[in-house]
Image (cartoon, rainbow, N blue to C red):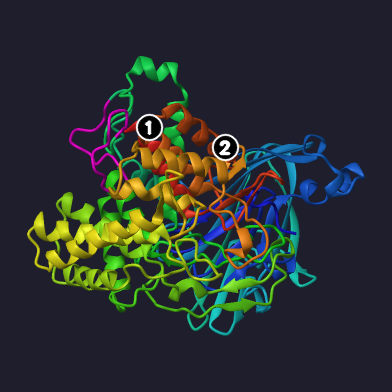
């Protein structure tokens, strides 16, 4: 059975990812890309759907030690328990310290950065002697294909006549896919898997690897464990160290650094904190009085790493999550495939990258956006593949689902939904790049002009909104404000930056749209923007309105909207829902769970409007719900006190970076 979502840690090689549970089981692994079919799919089914377990035997079979089955053995009384789990400094090299009644071991897990798709696991004896248990259920096609597995023991050693254990391997093959497992000892054949045990004493080291390769090729050469470990840790750390944080008590930046990941905004009224302003400007003495600031920095560092980990190093596409169909509500049907690239997420990540000294990634993300929308900018998709593919075909996979939550989906049927906000997010991002000195080229501005033509055509048009509603279409206020932002960015491109284009047409459409928004998307009696034209309800997407410059963060209209959002969307524990699902607004029964990104948008809105204490309270509440290695899913069930939805979720980590920037920068 799969673990709780928050019990997983992420491994990544910037091309794909794996999830490893606190119990030492790799339960999710797609190869060779994020969106490939899963080789390990126990996350969405049972152990028989593919996994790689490596843990002390006393943790796997506690009844043999205590006489009690695993589920009846409390962690503190268990014969084996995880004493500590953490990532190596600024990396995705995962260290798990196991403590048993006979000794302790450290298991180090990572995916080497390079051209191979590989999971590497090292077991080091720390104290005493520990018996380790290993199970390897090799699968393809989301656990539905059991491959043909061949064991190779290697050539005999001339001195001893016995094969060198280092040359042994298992090769699993099915159709176009193959995996090679190496390590000493190689587990033996068991029921529909390979399993075995070995003892490890203090000072001993055992290394294991699992490598994906195309079946028409030969198995790759064995990995050099020490070299690969050091190179991987160093590359992650070097990338993280590119950011010179100007909020550190002792300044490390030698030049101006972009100070926000948010979108352009008009100057606020008195009391507001405009984008880029420094709320506190903490000195070293103030830093000591507020140790939470370092907690914020660490959370931001980890979130930046997550964003990079979910960005394909070859294409520049960034997935919303490495998983599919982890349910937003346990047992429900809101189960989506997030192993694709949402335009708004990628566009927001451009700002994150620029604002934190990762110009190379910003350029990669920008170029991916241009290639994706070049499919047809007048018929914009919301979701694209890692290389910019426009695949709108959603399939259902025959899997039991996470804790019985079905259906399990592959692909995104929302790709062809009209979501006007995507155009706005794109144009606002390109305008920000222009303001920072990025030049337009022969491709970028013509594509934007085509987008602007499409924005004019969609003014006042119904869509499914940012939340991809499966109910009836409506004229969502947030979508229309983002279209306003797109047109405003186009006007600026001509009048401020000297680009060619029909600025008068775009300005006229922008101004007409503003009148419509104030007439139908803002309720003056309630002093609040509303979720859709003519309605009275609100949704959390309205928290992004001030980022566009349509109003200021501390305007009476935003304050009134925030007040209603906190009242109507309150989920408890400082978190909010995305929307209230009255009358099956989203096409499903019942209310979904509290949304991390929305809650962080609320925190940032408070901070930028001058209500810093309230914003920090909300931010702290979210950080308390992150897991032990700093990861966030898309949603959180307060009733169950556990994470729900796909994991980790890029949008949540983007929102976390932006909220913390509002405090520190």
Check if residue 259 falls in the magenta segment: yes
> Residue 663 shows which numbered tag?
1
Depth check: give the residue in front, 447 or 125.
447
Q: Can I make out residue 279 in this image?
A: yes
Q: Can I make out residue 183 in this image?
A: no
Q: Quadrant of residue 280?
A: top left
* 529 with respect to 72 (left or right): left
Mark 1, Cα crowd under 10 Å, few <14 / some 14-19 / many 20+, is many
Quadrant of the rendering where the N terminus is positioned: bottom right
Q: Residue at x 17, y 50 (%)?
A: 435
Q: Relative to 169, say whether 425 is above or below.
A: above
> Residue 574 shows which numbered tag?
2
Q: Relative to 468, say whether 636 is above or below.
A: above
Depth check: give the residue in front, 528 or 100.
528
Depth check: give the residue in front, 478 or 383.
478
* 298 with respect to 578 (left or right): left
Label 1 residue SS: helix
Q: Residue at x 50, y 53 (%)?
A: 536
Q: Residue at x 30, y 41 (%)?
A: 552
Label 2 residue SS: loop
Q: Earlier in the sequence, mark 2 or mark 1?
A: 2
Q: Position of residue 658 (x, y in %)?
A: 38, 43
């Amino acid at each position: 059975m799969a673990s709780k979502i928050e019990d997983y840690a992420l491994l990544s090689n910037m091309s794909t990812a794996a999830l490893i549970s606190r119990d030492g089981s790799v339960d999710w692994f797609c190869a060779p890309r994020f969106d490939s079919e899963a080789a390990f799919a126990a996350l969405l089914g049972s152990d028989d759907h593919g996994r790689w377990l490596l843990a002390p035997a006393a943790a796997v079979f506690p009844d043999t030690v205590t006489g009690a089955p695993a589920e009846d053995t409390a962690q503190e009384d268990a014969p084996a328990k995880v004493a500590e789990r953490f990532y190596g400094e600024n990396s995705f090299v995962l260290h798990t310290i196991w403590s048993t009644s006979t000794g302790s071991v450290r298991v180090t897990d990572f995916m080497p950065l390079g051209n191979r798709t590989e999971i590497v696991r090292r077991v080091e004896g720390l104290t005493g002697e520990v018996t380790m248990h290993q199970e390897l259920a090799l699968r393809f096609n989301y656990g539905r294909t059991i491959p043909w597995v061949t064991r190779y023991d290697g050539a005999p050693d001339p001195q001893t006549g016995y094969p060198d254990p280092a040359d042994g391997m298992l090769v699993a093959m099915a159709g176009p896919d193959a995996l090679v497992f190496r390590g000493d000892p190689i587990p033996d054949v068991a029921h529909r898997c390979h399993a075995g045990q070995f003892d490890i004493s203090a000072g001993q080291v055992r290394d294991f690897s699992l490598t994906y390769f195309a079946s028409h090729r030969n198995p790759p050469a064995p990995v050099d464990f020490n070299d690969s470990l050091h190179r991987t840790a160093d590359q992650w750390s070097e990338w993280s160290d590119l950011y010179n944080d100007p909020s550190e008590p002792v300044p490390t930046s030698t030049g101006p650094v972009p100070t926000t990941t948010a979108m352009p905004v008009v100057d606020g009224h008195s009391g507001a904190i405009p984008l880029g302003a420094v709320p506190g400007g903490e000195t070293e003495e103030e830093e000591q009085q507020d140790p939470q600031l370092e907690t914020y920095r660490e959370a931001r560092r980890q979130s930046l790493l997550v964003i990079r980990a979910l960005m394909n190093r070859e294409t520049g596409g960034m997935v919303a999550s490495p998983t599919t169909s982890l349910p937003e509500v346990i047992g429900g049907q809101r189960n989506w495939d997030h192993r694709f690239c949402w335009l708004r997420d990628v566009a927001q990540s451009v700002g994150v990258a620029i604002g934190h000294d990762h110009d190379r990634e910003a350029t990669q993300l920008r170029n991916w956006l241009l290639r994706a929308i070049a499919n047809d900018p007048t018929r914009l998709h919301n979701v694209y593949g890692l290389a910019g593919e426009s695949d709108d075909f959603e399939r259902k996979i025959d899997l039991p689902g996470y804790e019985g939550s079905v259906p399990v989906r592959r692909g995104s049927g929302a790709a062809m939904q009209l979501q006007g906000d995507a155009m706005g997010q794109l144009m606002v991002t390109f305008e920000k790049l222009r303001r920072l000195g990025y030049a337009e080229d022969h491709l970028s501005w013509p594509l934007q002009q085509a987008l602007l033509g499409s924005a004019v055509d969609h003014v006042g048009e119904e869509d499914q909104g940012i939340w991809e509603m499966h109910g009836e279409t409506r004229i969502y206020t947030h979508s229309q404000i983002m279209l306003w932002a797109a047109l405003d960015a186009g006007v600026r491109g001509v009048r401020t930056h000297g680009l060619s284009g029909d600025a008068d047409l775009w300005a006229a459409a922008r101004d007409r749209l503003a009148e419509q928004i104030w007439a139908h998307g803002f309720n003056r009696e309630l002093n609040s923007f509303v979720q859709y034209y003519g309605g009275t309800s609100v949704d959390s997407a309205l928290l992004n309105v001030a980022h566009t410059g349509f109003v200021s963060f501390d305007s009476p209209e935003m304050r009134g909207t925030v007040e209603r959002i906190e009242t109507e969307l309150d989920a408890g524990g400082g978190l909010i829902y995305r929307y209230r699902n009255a009358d099956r607004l989203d096409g499903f029964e019942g209310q979904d769970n509290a949304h991390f990104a929305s809650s962080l948008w609320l925190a940032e809105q408070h901070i930028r409007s001058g209500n810093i204490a309230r914003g920090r309270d909300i931010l702290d509440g979210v950080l308390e719900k992150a897991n032990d290695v700093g990861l966030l899913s898309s949603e959180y069930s307060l009733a169950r006190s556990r994470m729900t939805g796909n994991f980790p979720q890029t949008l949540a980590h983007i929102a976390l970076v932006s909220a913390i920037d509002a405090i520190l920068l």
